[in-house]
Structures are given as C-alpha cells and as structure tokens.
Image (cartoon, rainbow, N blue to C red):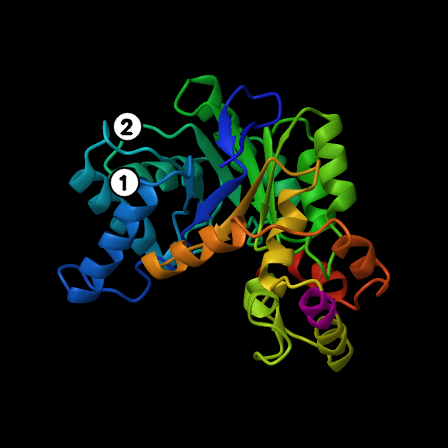
Amino acid sequence: MTHKTLGSTGIHVGDITLGTSALGEGTAPGSAEEEAAVAAAVDLLTGEFALVDTSNNYGNGRSEAVLGLALAQVGPSLATARIATKVDRDGRTGAFDRDRVMRSYEESLTRLGVDRVEILHLHDPYSITFEQAAAPGGALEGMRELRETGAVEVIGIAAGPIPLMTRYVETGLFDVVLSHNRFTLVDRSAEALFAEARRRGMGVFNAAPFGAGILAKGAASRPSYGYNEASPELMAWIARAEQVCADHGVPLAAAALHFSLRSELVDSTIVGIASSRRLVQLRELRDTVIPDALWPDLDALGPAPSPLPERDAEESRPLL
C-alpha cells in the first residue's frame, strides 16, 4: 500500500480505501449471514488498508452495525484500519438540516461503537436544495459545528453530480471531496472538480473506479454503468478497451483500478468490498504490473460515450 496525505489535512491514507456500501446488506441481527459479514469486516479492519469507508444509510445502517460488531471483536487497539463515515438525510422524511446532521452522526457512532471518527462526509444531499443546505440551521451549519467543536477532524462532501458537487466545493467549507463513477476509464467528468479541489488544498477520494461493476466484469456483463443502463456505443467502447488490455496481458479490471491509482488528482481510490474473497481479488488487481504502453493505446480509442453527464442534471434536483 502506498501511503498518501489527504490533501492539506495532515491525515494519512492509503492509495486504496475499502468501501462498504454492500457490507451486511440484507442481513438480520444474529443470523449466519451477519456472522459472515462480520468475518469479512474483521478482514477489512485488520489488513494493510488504512481506511474503511461507510455511511449512515448503507444497507439501512447494517454496514455500520456490522463494522461495529467487527471492531468490538477485534478491539480498537488491534484494528489497523480507521473508519470514515457519512451523515445522511432522514430516510422517512427526507429532512437534512443541522439537527439531522447531528442525529445522523450520533446514530453512526452508536452503531460503530466509537466516540468519534476523523473523517465525516455530507452524503448525497439530494432531498434539499443547495440554498437550503447553506441557510442558517442548514446541513452546512451542522457540519461546520462538528468540526469546530472537535467532534470530527475533517469534513467532506460526498455525492455524484458534478455541478452540485462544484457548488459545495466552492463554499470553501469542506476539507475533502468524494465523487463516484465520474473519474474512470470511461468517464472523466470529475477531472475539473478534482483539479479545483487540489487547487484549494482539499483531499480527494475517487470512488467506484469500476463504474459499479462493468469495468471489472467487462463487455460481456450486464450493460449497466454507474447504476444507469449502458448504451450499445459504450458497451462497444468497453469491448475495444478490453481487447487493448488483453493485448498487453492485463485484465480490464486492473487497468480500471490503476487508472485511478496513477492519477495525481486522487489521494485515495475507494473500492467496494463486501467479502473476504473480493478483498483477495482487490490485492491481485493492485499488484498487477501495468505496462506503460497500455495507457497511450487506451487513449487512442478516443473518449468513451458515457450516460452520466446527462443524468447529473436530474440528480442535482431536490427530491420531492
């Protein structure tokens, strides 16, 4: 693992952060499925990776609950990974104001069984407008208060749509930015956002380098990129990229991961892991040697057609 400093925060992270959006999903407390998820979480917390990323709403709280059980089993002093989490809107009412930020954080701490986390993100603020978030008593006030009181070290904004993310970054409030599915082999739309974050001294997390799976499984997989249906043109581009990688003796998944790892714009790449088996696969991809000649050959394919830019305008609107 390559150690990096998260922007100007002084916090050290690895070049890979383990994501847990699917960890414990659908498991019931005390079930065999929960036991298996906890075993996987123990592996995440005791390996070579420095940071595990979760959220209040992942699996309706099950991701944090499973991590909390694993942390209690391992013991905080023996865990080699730290946990970062995110505050989320109220799942029933959609409320996402200062008070909801505080309640969300307390819920997360209770599930995780910890007193605080270093890194806390404002997550997917789609149920409110930016103006509501920035108003007195809004979500930004809550995030600022948590940092100023020392409840957390740094605060971040974590979401997808680039126009919305840019507005939050431009407030100057946040220390860290986290975007998903928008800086990959087939979508570079977060590049300007990450560059601006870099200019401001912010830390940068790039999540979902596999585009929610398609860049790990290849063109023969289900045609879906970033939770959206992938166009035939995009699938054809991925098939060509897969062949270029094969010509260099490299799996497409390894190229997709290393595209993010090699970028000077990215401090840490978040890869979703929900099982010990996937953790082994991640290590194999990380350790794959990528020939320098691969990158110009992939560039020669030209820009890939991506469905995400059109979707961003929709995702930026508040939910009614």
Q: Position of residue 8 (x, y in %)?
A: 61, 21
Q: Is residue 259 left or right of residue 157?
A: right
Q: Is residue 245 magenta?
A: yes
| Front one among 129 and 48 | 48
As displayed, is residue 201 above or below residue 129? Answer: above
Mark 1 closeness class: few <14, some 14–19, many ≥20 residues within 10 Å? many
Q: Which region of the structure is painted magenta?
A: 241-247
Q: CA distance from mark 1 to mark 2?
A: 9 Å
As displayed, is residue 67 above or below residue 278? Answer: above
| Front one among 92 and 194 | 194
At a point 33% along the width and 53% down the height, the residue shown is: 63
Mark 2 closeness class: few <14, some 14–19, many ≥20 residues within 10 Å? few
Q: Residue furthest left?
A: 30
Q: Secondary structure at mark 1?
A: helix
Q: Is residue 275 visible?
A: no
Q: Which residue is mark 1?
A: 112
Q: Which residue is mark 2?
A: 115
Q: Position of residue 234 (x, y in %)?
A: 74, 74
Q: Position of residue 147 (x, y in %)?
A: 47, 23
